[in-house]
């Protein structure tokens, strides 16, 4: 709905990393709109935080990333809220609600929602509703908590501000027959071959601009840079501990099948812009009016054969189904009653957009809706496993080729890892890439290191060891302890020769340098052995390095490993330091605050 001057409205701010928080926020916005409640839905980095005291009602939908980190889009907002100059009454008179999205298998489950809730309270804001916590581990995903939380929210808002709702908040406009309109508009262009900016003989700069222009038109664009930092066969620069993001190529067979299924002309040229209504609400950051080929737009922005569509996709599909049985099935999937069955059909099976469209052949969705609702093609992030000093103009990645079987015995493969594994080193392939800082800052050569990296978590530490080996040739360096883990020595011992070479006399990991290399092979004996067990065996060595100012770096799976390692460290500090577990926990917290405890974990 368009905003009217001085008219009360509901403000919904979201901070998303994977798109789930954005999806939940937009659903809240749609439900408010259907109740004729004036509403504005914004990404949190599009909102000026100093304006917060002038809002009356704000709903925050925030995800938690990594080990309790705020999403990139929220970092500036969060820094602003943490200013000491803000008084305890700065947000007096502002009502708020917080809904968090997280995963209870992580140690810091929904940490961002919890600390945002506390900070808003500290600043004088009034909670409208108890914070909601969505959990990826719930049988229905985060929606298992969102649905009841949202129903309760409308009732509370109606009682507190009935002027926001012309009708009963439990009844959507037109008795549920409300049909949404797309938020974007697509214009087709007649582009002659001579004027095409997408020729086959394209240079690097033009290709960079094409990727930037195309991805900036996508409604699912992130807040980061659109233009690649480089292509991976050009000169590059990075530090150890940095992260490389790669834009994968989609299977051309799947792209062609999608174009055919949706009756799209791959040779057409289009521009994608916000609809007139969206522009009237202040969205002026749309892409420049330069046409791109429709097939190129799909290839670079729309994840058609890897990501699963969201619930709203099924709701909109139902509006365009000509077969009655398909329409009814889609309406059921989009309803609260069909939520669990949809989760089993869609998310659990990881059905792709293309597969869903093929399952409902009578559906013919307009391109505007396809562009708006199909999950965006995202870059994939990898910890860099090399030192730029040791390998100039090279970047090394440690990639596990992802493959799994669904409950209905379908084989699924990871888009990016499968694509990378299938590249021919003899062919010239341009890989769009972005470098950025990760959670593991490059350490000073004078700082002792305790590294824990089971599985592909060893990736960044290969770069650390390479860098320290070079540094040791020109001056003294501090010791390095590295704890590695894998299932079997025979099959999973990544970079075995590399680690063992640095373990030899005079090497970075050698005992005569004060270092050490310890491996846990979890499946090579009847009783499972993990990195935390090897750490306890070396408790004296770990304590001596910690007492000498060591930094701790942890990388790998986000499930139980980081919390198990943390528990082992607390035990070691308690045992070797002769202190209680509570004091040991505070000791580690102090390490973290001083920048000497770092975790980079992934699902």
Image (cartoon, rainbow, N blue to C red):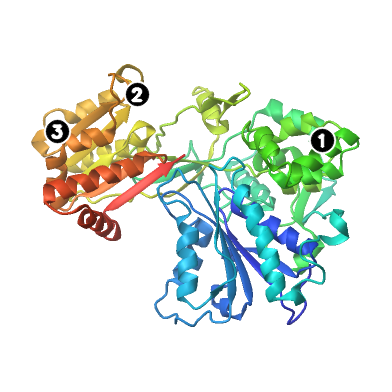
Q: Which residue is mark 1?
A: 262
Q: Is residue 508 visible?
A: no
447 vs 104, left or right, is: left
In primary-sequence order, the first of circles 2 and 3 is 2
Residue 2 point in image, percent of width and height: 78, 70
Camera-nearest residue between 170 and 447: 170
In primary-sequence order, the first of circles 3 and 1 is 1
Would you place residue 201 above or below residue 52 in this image? Answer: above
Q: Is residue 148 visible?
A: yes
Residue 465 point in image, percent of width and height: 25, 38
178 vs 499, left or right, is: right
Residue lying furthest left: 512
Compute the Cα span from label 1 to label 2.
45 Å
Q: Residues within 10 Å of mark 3 (few under 14, many from 20)?
A: many
Q: Picture quarter containing residue 363?
A: top right
Local SS, label 3:
loop
Q: Which residue is mark 3?
A: 510
């Amino acid at each position: 709905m368009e905003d009217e001057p001085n008219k009360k409205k509901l403000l919904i701010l979201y901070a998303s990393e994977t798109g789930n928080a954005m999806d939940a926020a937009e659903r809240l916005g749609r439900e408010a709109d259907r109740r004729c409640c004036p509403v504005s839905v914004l990404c949190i980095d599009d909102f000026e935080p100093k304006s917060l005291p002038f809002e009356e009602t704000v709903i925050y939908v925030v995800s938690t990333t990594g080990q309790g980190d705020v999403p990139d889009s929220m970092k500036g907002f969060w820094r602003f809220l943490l200013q000491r100059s803000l008084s305890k009454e700065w947000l007096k008179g502002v009502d708020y609600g917080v809904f968090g999205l997280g995963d209870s298998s992580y140690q810091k489950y929904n940490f961002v929602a919890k600390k945002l809730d506390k900070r808003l309270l500290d600043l004088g804001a009034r909670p409208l509703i108890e914070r909601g916590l969505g959990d990826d581990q719930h049988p229905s995903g985060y929606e298992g908590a969102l649905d009841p939380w949202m129903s309760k929210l409308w009732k509370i808002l109606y009682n507190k501000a009935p002027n926001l709702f012309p009708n009963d908040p439990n009844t959507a406009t037109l008795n549920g027959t409300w049909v949404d309109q797309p938020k974007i508009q697509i214009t087709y262009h007649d582009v002659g071959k001579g004027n095409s900016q997408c020729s086959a003989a394209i240079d690097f700069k033009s290709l960079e601009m094409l990727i930037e222009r195309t991805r900036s038109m996508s409604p699912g664009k992130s807040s980061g840079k659109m233009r690649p930092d480089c292509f991976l066969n050009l000169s590059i620069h990075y530090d150890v501990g940095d992260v490389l993001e790669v834009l994968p190529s989609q299977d051309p067979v799947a792209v062609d099948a999608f174009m055919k299924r949706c009756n799209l002309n791959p040779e057409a040229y289009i521009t994608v812009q916000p609809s007139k209504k969206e522009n009237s609400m202040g969205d002026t950051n749309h892409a420049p009016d330069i046409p791109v080929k429709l097939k190129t737009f799909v290839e670079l922005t729309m994840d058609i054969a890897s990501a699963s569509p969201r619930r709203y996709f099924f709701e909109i599909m139902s509006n365009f189904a000509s077969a009655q049985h398909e329409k009814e099935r889609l309406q059921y999937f989009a309803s609260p009653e069909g939520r669990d069955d949809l989760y089993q059909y869609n998310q659990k099976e990881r059905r792709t957009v293309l597969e869903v469209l093929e399952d409902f052949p009578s559906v013919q969705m307009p391109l505007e809706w396809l562009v708006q609702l199909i999950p965006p093609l995202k870059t994939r992030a990898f910890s860099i496993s090399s030192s730029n000093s040791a390998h100039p103009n090279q970047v090394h990645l440690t990639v596990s080729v992802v493959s799994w079987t669904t409950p209905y015995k379908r084989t699924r493969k990871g888009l990016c890892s499968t694509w990378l594994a299938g590249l021919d080193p003899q062919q010239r392939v341009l890989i769009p890439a972005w470098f950025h800082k990760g959670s593991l800052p490059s350490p000073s050569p004078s700082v002792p290191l305790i590294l824990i990296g089971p599985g592909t978590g060893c990736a960044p530490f290969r770069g650390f060891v390479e860098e320290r080996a070079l540094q040791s040739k020109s001056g003294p360096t501090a010791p390095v302890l590295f704890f590695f883990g894998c299932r079997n020595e025979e099959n999973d011992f990544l970079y075995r020769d590399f680690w063992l070479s640095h373990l030899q006399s005079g090497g970075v990991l050698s005992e005569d340098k004060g270092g050490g290399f310890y491996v846990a092979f979890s499946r090579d004996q009847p009783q499972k052995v993990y990195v935390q067990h090897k750490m306890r065996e070396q408790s004296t060595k770990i304590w001596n390095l910690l007492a000498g100012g060591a930094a701790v770096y942890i990388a790998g799976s986000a499930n139980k490993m980081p919390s198990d390692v943390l528990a082992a460290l607390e035990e070691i500090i308690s045992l070797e330091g002769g202190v209680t577990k509570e004091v040991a926990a505070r000791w580690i917290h102090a390490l973290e605050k001083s920048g000497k405890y770092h975790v980079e974990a992934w699902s």
